[in-house]
Amino acid sequence: MSRAIIDLHDIAYAFPGRAATLDGLDFHLHEGGKVGLFGPNGAGKTTMLHILMGLLRPDRGTVSLFGKTMADGKGFDEARLKIGFLFQHSDDQLFCPTVLDDVAFGPLNQGLPPDQARDRAAEALAAVGLSGFEDRVPYRLSGGEKKLVALATILSMRPEVLVLDEPTTGLSPEAKDRLVEILTNLDMARLVVSHEPDFLSATTDTLLAMRDGRIYPGKLKAHSHVHVHEEGDVPHEHEH
Amino acid sequence: MTAIAAPFAEGRSLLHRLDPRFRLLAAAALTLPAAVLHDLRAALAALAAGALLVLLARLSPVRVAGRVLAVNAFILFLWLFIPFSLDGAPLLVLGPFTATREGVDLALLLTVKSNAILLTLMALLGTIPVQDLGPAMQRLGVPGKLCHILLFTYRYIFVIHQEYLTMRQAMQARGFRPRTDRHTYRSYAWLLGMLLVRSWDRAERVHGAMRCRGFQGRFYTLTSFAAAPGDYAFLAGSLIVTAAIICLEIMRIS
């Protein structure tokens, strides 16, 4: 059996003064695994991701990354360098004056010399189709471009696993398609969290659902639905 | 909705090619004495040095004039008060107010000093791209926290401004009209409080995101600084000018 990359055991977490967000949660991701986690807003998906990245400390339970139990901050510092975590809001992730500086930030922290960090950045930007964006200002990019730059900032670290938190939030349909295309072409272990089943089924092969602070095997079921078209009179084709 | 524009940082002049660390040092050497001068001739010398640096940096004259005017609009207010608030030889009597020679001298000195510092900083500090400024300060031993504050203020001030505008619009959409009453003051206080809370939350999220990319308190940079003989020569020149300005000042006192 392949090595476990992420292993959460019996995790419990409650925000101060509120009922438990997570309670007895177990989660595993193995090498090469592509797992989608589905759940309604407020189900605790982001909380779980922040616990697995060591940004929040669980009230109970253990976090193991790459086979090591995370006991303190130091273990997380090391493990984070191998996990590419994409935040829900790109403005939280992109903080440098130029795209190049932002994409090279991770590699520089990994200890690469500037030349190599620059090469890594160019490679990552090419992977998301944004070559030539090096000198642009992250803040002035469109939402879709910001998301792709944010993705490049973690790809440049050459992580062993991608952890994506609601990557489709606020994206236009075109930007979403672009993201699906990029993720399909990347052969990398991943945990994708989303409330969009369509996106999850396109980018992952195992579906889990989050409910009442725990994780259950997900079931994707095709069902017919009614939808509305902006310009229903115009003849059009469906791509189902 | 735009980030802070830095038109002066883009250029190919002699000054732009200098090592940012040396530009920072020269800026400190020239502006700190200028800030504490009392002698008009010394202040004029500092002003001349600033003007020369602006010429060397080949900055757009229109933009320079714009900024100089903006700063001098504030200095104009000094001219309304200072000449009338110092005791000394009367120069001009306007009803109950008397402008004195000493007052006018002081206002003139402040004006010259302010403009000298402004020009010097535009030429030396304004020409450093912000992505080089933090690392350059860090290399010179400026405390890390100070560098971080500078970088993040630059990056997030517009994000926070945008949140402020959004909240203002939401208030207006519910019929809020600012007036001079308790309701207005209380609403503004809440708006500012909320802005502070949101900024704090954002800072936490940004810091988390940085830690996830391996940040442990120190910035590394793509720019490698390499001092050339020209950098040393420039710094030496700046120090000589600084020394000359300090001499003028000391000669006046003795």
Image (tube, rainbow, N blue to C red):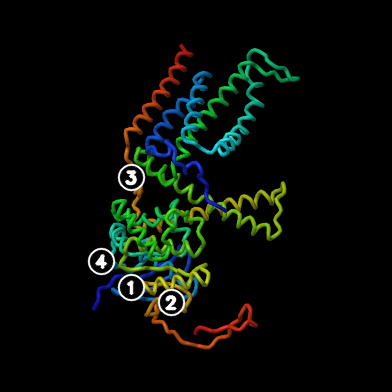
Name the residue type under label 3.
Ser
| CA separation in Å, label 1 and label 3 | 34 Å
Gap in Å between the C-alphas at discs 1 and 4?
Answer: 24 Å
Q: Element at badge 4? A: strand
- Quarter occupied by residue A31: bottom left
Image position of B215 with respect to B32: above or below: below
Name above or below for residue B210 compared with residue B151: below
Residue holding disc 4: A68
Q: CA distance from mark 4 to mark 3?
A: 36 Å
Task: Kindly identify which chain the residue marked by label 2 belongs to.
Answer: A
- What's the amino acid at mark 4? Lys
* Marks 2 and 1 close (CB-CB < 8 Å): no
> Mark 2, mark 1: which one is toward the viewer?
1
Q: CA distance from mark 2 to mark 3?
A: 42 Å
Q: Give neighbour class at mark 1: few <14, some 14-19, many 20+ (Cα, 10 Å).
A: few
Secondary structure under badge 2? helix
To which residue does mark 3 refer?
Answer: B224
Give the structural element (helix, strand or loop) at label 1.
loop
Pick the quarter of the image with the N terminus of chain A.
bottom left
Q: Badges 1 and 4: C-beta atoms under 8 Å apart?
A: no
